[in-house]
């Protein structure tokens, strides 16, 4: 217990101080956390943020891949306030529902590809993934295959921070020995990163090798044991990795041959980031059995995630008529979050934000591609509004920089001093700006990074 602090508008320094004494942040590095100050963000509008001292930044991070429609929208705030006034909360357990939850489920069913018509709302992306992974075992058991519960994922994937979601994901830096991860029944394939493919191998041969690796795993473990495969269509936090041409579709075909459920983790890639509601079908020609979404679903105004699953799965799980599906959360179908989700979709449709993201995203790709000519930039990659630059020690050999070089942190600190936020991650600087970004703002990002 500490003495209560006066609540009259604390200074930025006082806020830092409170934060240092009382907050445990996601992904805390204890040493620097206690030594260094951090940004105190106090206002946001469109693509811009202002810190507590009034400095303006163009937020090329987009919150955390999430502020898709841009911040500060009065009609979003109004929709949230009106719903909070009318019905701030009602649970959706068993057979209770509420107006925004029912309507948003219908909207998601309309927007999702194929027969993905059933929605379980969650509290965010991790809980959507967690629910999807558990649903694999549930479905396969209902199909008379109770042993078919293993999950296949990929190296460098990030699927969230619950015990199960983080066990399925595998970014090397996240695997600290202090935490224990579930290992039994979880397999990881190689990361499909064309930039880091074996020396001298064509991209097509690399793709063949990745598919062969999956087939070999199935042969070794047994198709009767592997129940599901999970993939981000473009790996986000693992390094904005766009897989080789045809890779996802071929992996999906392997899944279909072996009754392995395909889970598309579209927590980042949905809701316009790549110019489509969902990327799996529209961009990669894959019809998933389940899609996990969150982030852009409410553009970060309030927390919400969703697992969207197929009628086919539903019918198998419901066939017996007496089973319980014991998953879900107090805040599943939260009326305020769902009202925000509905308004978010309205705004995206009314303003044509998918087409805008596609167009301005193409310009963003072209502008950033030019950075590849700079001496320390090994790769510029990604699609549309999901891009990164990778710094290397040597462009010819692609030699990785030593961790101590802290190059991406150096770049992001320098950019921050020039009014631009880009996310440092390993040797990468990652960008996922709001979809409302303009070409002039893209120019500012490119010019600042170049400097
Ligand atoms: N899946 C992917 C692909 C993500 O990038 C993230 C978060 O960054 C998650 C899942 C977890 O989402 P949340 O942080 O909302 O739980």
Image (cartoon, rainbow, N blue to C red):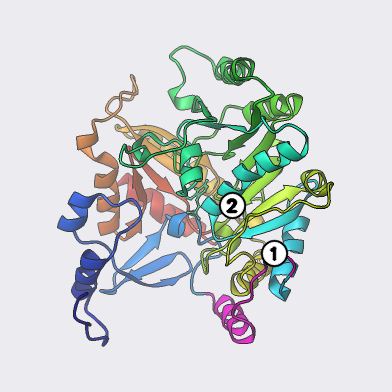
Label 1 belongs to which residue?
349
- Eyeballing the image, is 26 above or below 200? below
Say whether residue 287 is visible.
no
In the image, residue 94 lies in the stretch drawn in magenta: yes
- Eyeballing the image, is 387 above or below 78? above
Looking at the image, which residue is at 22% across and 82% down? 5
Residue 75 image-quadrant placement: bottom right
Label 2 belongs to which residue?
128
User: On the picture, is 269 further left or further right than 22?
Assistant: right
In the image, 327 versus 24, the foreground residue is 327
Q: Judging from the image, what secondary structure is the residue with disc 1 in?
A: helix
Looking at the image, which residue is at 50% across and 46% down? 386
Question: Any mark on residue 447, and which?
Answer: none
Please report the bounds of the magenta region as a residue range: 73-95
Q: Judging from the image, what secondary structure is the residue with disc 2 in?
A: helix
In the image, 381 versus 290, the foreground residue is 290
């Amino acid at each position: 217990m500490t003495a209560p602090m006066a609540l009259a508008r604390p200074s930025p320094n006082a806020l830092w101080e409170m934060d240092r004494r009382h907050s445990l942040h996601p992904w805390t590095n204890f040493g620097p956390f206690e030594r260094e100050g951090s940004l105190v963000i106090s206002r946001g509008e469109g693509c811009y943020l202002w810190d507590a001292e009034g400095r303006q930044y163009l937020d090329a991070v987009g919150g955390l891949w999430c502020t898709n429609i841009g911040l500060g929208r009065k009609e979003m705030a109004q929709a949230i306030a009106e719903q909070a006034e009318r019905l701030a909360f009602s649970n959706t357990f068993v057979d209770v529902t509420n107006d925004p939850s029912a309507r948003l489920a219908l909207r998601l069913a309309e927007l999702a590809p194929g027969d993905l018509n059933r929605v379980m709302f969650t509290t965010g992306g991790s809980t959507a993934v967690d629910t999807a992974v558990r649903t694999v075992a549930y479905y396969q058991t209902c199909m008379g295959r109770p042993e078919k519960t293993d999950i296949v994922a990929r190296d460098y994937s990030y699927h969230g921070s619950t015990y199960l979601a983080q066990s399925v994901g595998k970014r090397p830096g996240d695997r600290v020995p202090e935490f224990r991860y579930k290992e039994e029944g979880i397999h990881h394939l190689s990361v499909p990163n064309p930039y880091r493919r074996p020396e001298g191998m064509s991209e097509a041969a690399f793709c063949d090798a990745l598919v062969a690796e999956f087939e070999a795993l199935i042969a070794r473990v047994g198709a009767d044991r592997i129940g599901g495969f999970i993939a981000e269509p473009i790996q986000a936090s693992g390094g904005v990795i766009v897989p080789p041409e045809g890779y996802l579709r071929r992996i999906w075909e392997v899944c279909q041959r072996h009754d392995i459920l395909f889970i598309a983790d579209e927590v980042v890639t949905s809701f316009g980031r790549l110019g489509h509601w969902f990327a799996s079908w529209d961009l990669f020609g894959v019809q998933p059995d389940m899609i996990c979404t969150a982030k852009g679903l409410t553009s970060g105004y309030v927390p919400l995630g969703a697992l969207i699953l197929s009628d086919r799965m539903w019918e198998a799980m419901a066939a017996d008529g007496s089973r319980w599906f014991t998953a879900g959360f107090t805040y599943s179908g939260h009326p305020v979050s769902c009202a925000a989700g509905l308004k978010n979709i309205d705004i995206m449709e009314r303003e044509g934000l998918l087409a805008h993201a596609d167009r301005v995203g193409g310009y963003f790709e072209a502008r950033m591609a030019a950075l590849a000519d700079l001496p320390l930039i090994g790769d510029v990659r990604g699609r549309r509004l999901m891009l990164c630059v990778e710094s290397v020690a040597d462009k010819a050999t692609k030699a990785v920089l030593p961790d101590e070089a802290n190059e991406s942190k150096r770049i992001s600190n320098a950019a921050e001093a020039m009014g631009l936020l880009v996310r440092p991650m390993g040797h990468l600087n990652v960008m996922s700006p709001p979809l409302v970004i303009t070409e002039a703002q893209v120019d500012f990002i490119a010019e600042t990074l170049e400097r």
